[in-house]
Image (cartoon, rainbow, N blue to C red):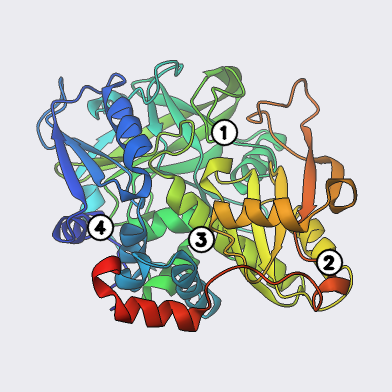
Amino acid sequence: MSNAVQTDLRAFLAAVEKGGELKTVNRAHWDKEMGAVTEVLYREKVDRSPLLLFDDIPGYPKGFRCIYGMLGSPFRLALGFGLDASVASRDRMALLDQFRKQIKTNKPIPPRMVERGPVMENIAEGAAVDLLKFPVPIHHELDGGRYIGTACAVITRDPDTGRINMGTYRVQVISGNSCASYISNGKQGRIHRDKYFKSGKPCPMAIVVGIDPVSYIAARYTLADTVAELDWAGGIAGAPIDCVPGPITGLPIPAQSEIVLEGECVPDEQVLEGPFGEWTGYYAGDAKMEPLIRIKAAYWRNDPILTCAASQKPPHSHLFERCFIRSAALMDSLEGAGIPDVKGVWVHQAGSGRTFVVVAIRQRYFGHSTQVGMVASQVNPVGYVGRYIVVVDEDIDPSDIHDVIWAMGTRSDPKQDIQILTKTWSSRLDPMVTGKELYNSRAVIDACIPYERLETFPKVAQTSPELARAVRAKFPDVFG
């Protein structure tokens, strides 16, 4: 049974608690403890772990809370997106199909501008702004500071077109009223910022650091440059996202947000940002100089909730939704490229949600599998810092690593079925990249049965679906 799309974090948390997947943790310290508790738990239970709500944090009033793992299970992701949670628990590919049907029929709805919203219950401006009023964590032991923006959305406007972008980029606290953000080359927020800087102007920003599930998914989903994320989120919700015009920037601020910072990124002042434990599972990219962001106002709800996402060596607390969302985006990209008969995609957790990707197809012609692998290696979201792309037949579940490796070991020949691409798009976050040349390489592995042998390849030694159903029915005590 489907649920309502969640556009308010508090309503979402109540539904998560009702579903038995919320755990409150009291007295964990902001300095490394919250991140460590989350990592240890998710390493043991992976996507069966609960959402962690940290309260009564030392040095902060009770009610000033942090959460980790917002969408870190199939149930919670289904809940946030209004999908069938019963499917989520048993079949990832079926859940992915539901998600894709929803986004393929999505008709973007622009935000509805309102005068006020819950996020404006508390306002601090100018000298009164103090980012450390909130229990901003040190997420990992070797982080260069406290990161207020992790499960967040940085909102910017293209100075040429007026298009609003909302993307998830890390944000480090520098002082009580300033911070800095690393934005990878090629990302829309970086393009907007660079345009302002080129003209010698500061870049207006609104940074949502206490975010609702749908806005968060929109900020992380790979959309065409012509589609605004807030409009896309409204289409998913079936109604406009209520937004307050930012008093400083005029940027749309989701009215149900928990905490929002508003200000500008300046072109003529830089500060040291990083290092930070990143999605690769490394403190990659080191500490580098980044433009300062001056925070001119902060807005927050009573008893605010800071939404957090600490990346570590896989698995970790926000890896499931990362892989799920990117799998859907890759399916969209392949279909948009005109590739026929793509039957499934999975961006694997063990590949940090980028570096190990599997595409399942029904082969239709000579070269089909090679074509799919080459295209998948370059389109969003795999085009950025991808590494290995494996193409398999439709009888292989792309999300089942045992199935995938079996196909690689029995249907591919290393000499002729591995293609290497060079000078592809990477990032300073890639631990294999050194220097200023932000390139990497890709391996495309064809693990499909050779097309000319589809009719003669040895049969798979596996119980037929009919016999499997029969023995399940005959011996229910074995399978109960």
Query: Badge 1 is on which residue?
Result: 280
Per the image, label 4 sits on a secondary structure element best described as loop
Picture coordinates of residue 303, whole percent (x, y): 14, 41
Type of amino acid under label 2? Pro
Type of amino acid under label 1? Thr
Query: Pointer 3: residues within 10 angstroms few (<14), some, or many (20+)?
Result: many
Mark 2, mark 3: which one is toward the viewer?
2
Q: Which numbered disc, 2 or 3, marks the residue that appears first in the sequence?
A: 3
Mark 2, mark 4: which one is toward the viewer?
2
Query: Badge 4 is on which residue?
Result: 116
Q: Which numbered disc, 3 or 1, marks the residue that appears first in the sequence?
A: 3
Query: Badge 2 is on which residue?
Result: 450
Picture coordinates of residue 302, whole percent (x, y): 14, 44
Q: Which mark is residue 229?
A: 3
Relative vertical location of residue 284 with respect to residue 402 in this rendering, above or below: above
Q: Which numbered disc, 4 or 3, marks the residue that appears first in the sequence?
A: 4
Relative vertical location of residue 194 with respect to residue 175 in this rendering, above or below: below
Query: Pointer 2: residues within 10 angstroms few (<14), some, or many (20+)?
Result: some
Identity of the residue drawn at 81% across and 75% down: 456
Type of amino acid under label 4? Arg
Relative vertical location of residue 133 with respect to residue 345 in this rendering, above or below: above
Residue contact between numbered discs 4 and 3, judged by CB atoms under 8 Å:
no
Relative vertical location of residue 406 with respect to residue 186 in this rendering, above or below: below
